[in-house]
Amino acid sequence: MIRITNTLSGKKEEFIPLEEGRVKMYVCGPTVYNLIHVGNARAAVVFDSFRRYLEYRGYSVTYVQNFTDIDDKIIKTANEEGISTKRLSDRYVAEYFKDACRLGIEPATFHPRTTDFVNEIIDFISVLQKKGFAYSKNGDVYFDVSAFKSYGALSNRKLSDMRSGARVEINDSKDDPLDFVLWKAAKAGEPSWNSPWKSGRPGWHIECSVMSTTLLGDSFDIHAGGNDLIFPHHENERAQSEAWSGKKWVNYWMHNGMISVKKEKMSKSLGNIFNVREALRVYGPNALRMYLLSKHYRSPMEFSSDRMEEAKASYNRIANAMDEIKRKIGDDTKAVEDSFSKEWRARMNEALDDDFNTPQAFSVIFELVKEALLTDDREHLAKIRALFMEWNYFLGFDFEKKNVNADAFVETLVELRNTARVRNDYEQADAIRKKLKELGVEIRDSSNGSHWRWM
Ligand SMILES: [Zn+2]
């Protein structure tokens, strides 16, 4: 029996999908105006791994992760660069997939983008307006929070408390400071779409309601994301969706904790981002994945070089055990249903069935690592390897990739190329440059020598 802590009830609940054997799941994805940071990667890796665990346990999972490809930050960055919002967001969607792929994140079943759903969003808002949950003012459309009775249930807040804490803007045309925007009339020079109101663009919250219900149906099993999204984003998504359909929208809400750097929440606005590209370059994908899964997904985590070194050492314990098995028995593997394998599988399932307790799962793995190092029995080792490989379906490590220091490796190649150039062997120098480019390294030659960077 799988149990999940449901933010809506605040309790650990038995997971029962709406349809037997099938799970429909939505995770809020990144706003694509920059490279993703380690905080974004936590939700992506944790829920990727959880989705794969559900698949491992026999469920067929439809997994949706969106890209927010229109919003204030995107418009601002595109203007600064003098390019269209489409060009900017296309670039960072592609960059997201590069990082996700290196991090071993499986593509979602669907990766919808807001601007592909504008017609559906307009229809959805029109229904809300017809049902009396939305009103338009000066071309903007707002959700009327007072019309939705259980507003605040997800974030466990009372309307009166929220109201006293809400910021009232001087030029606000909203009836209530808590009302939130569904459709924003365009300002001069902003990208816009025609609508029954003024031409404009969707507000942030509405996109997730529309993309999830379009792709997964009026009601689905799991909605996940970072706990910084509970209020107002998820509270608002829930209000819109249930007002629209008149049905319960999501059965289980899962939220991961934040990653802090020196106790500050990691976010782009704080300027303390450690982007994933950088972390991958320094520590490699396996150590980063290990780090992100090493704590329970609901707990807060600290990001520091010490924590990353610990994660790297933990991952290396597993990778070294795999190497040791290979040294002892070659590529033999034995997936069996005997009492030994059954017992270890049961222990792993017990850990992860309990609200996806990955730290507990790793303690099971480290016990098995010890067993692997203590025995020379071929059959025993082949069974242990089979279990590691089986579990790796949801852990998502790449055991083939060694944790060599990639930078030192690149430095060596760049030096070799420099020596080739000094002796005028341009053929060799070009061959090395080409090879490095294939590996994602760009070299620039200038009067003060060659500089390189990861692309
Ligand atoms: Zn969302």
Image (cartoon, rainbow, N blue to C red):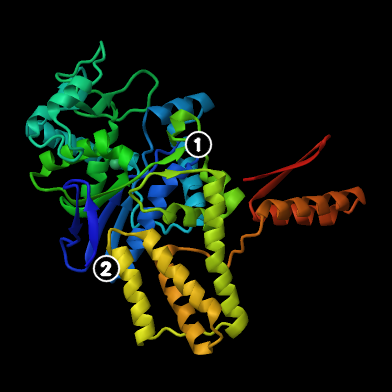
Question: Does residue 73 sit above or below 361 in this rendering?
Answer: above
Quadrant assignment for the C terminus: top right
Q: Which residue is mark 2?
A: 59
Question: Could you say which is closer to the camera, residue 353 or residue 48?
Answer: 353
Q: Secondary structure at mark 2?
A: loop
Give the residue drawn at x 31%, y 41%: 227
Residue 406 in sight: yes
Question: Could you say which is closer to the camera, residue 180 or residue 377?
Answer: 377
Give the residue drawn at x 14%, y 18%: 175
Q: Amino acid at mark 2?
A: Tyr
Q: Amino acid at mark 1?
A: Ile
At which x and y percent is residue 439?
A: 65, 55
Question: Real-space Cα distance between discs 1 and 2?
Answer: 36 Å
| Quadrant location, ligand no. 1 | top left
Q: Is mark 2 within 8 Å of ligand 1?
A: no
Question: Does residue 125 sit above or below 252 in this rendering?
Answer: above
Give the residue drawn at x 66%, y 55%: 405
Quadrant assignment for the N terminus: bottom left
At which x and y percent is residue 126?
A: 14, 34
Question: Does residue 57 sit above or below 216 in this rendering?
Answer: below
Residue 273's mark?
A: 1
Q: Residues within 10 Å of mark 2 (few under 14, many from 20)?
A: some
Question: Does residue 226 sit above or below 310 in this rendering?
Answer: above
Residue 300: image quadrant is top left
Q: Looking at the image, is mark 1 or mark 2 earlier in the sequence?
A: 2
At which x and y percent is residue 2?
A: 24, 64
At which x and y percent is residue 16?
A: 17, 62
Q: Residues within 10 Å of mark 1 (few under 14, many from 20)?
A: some
Q: Is mark 1 within 8 Å of ligand 1?
A: no
Q: Secondary structure at mark 1?
A: loop
455 lies left or right of 351: right
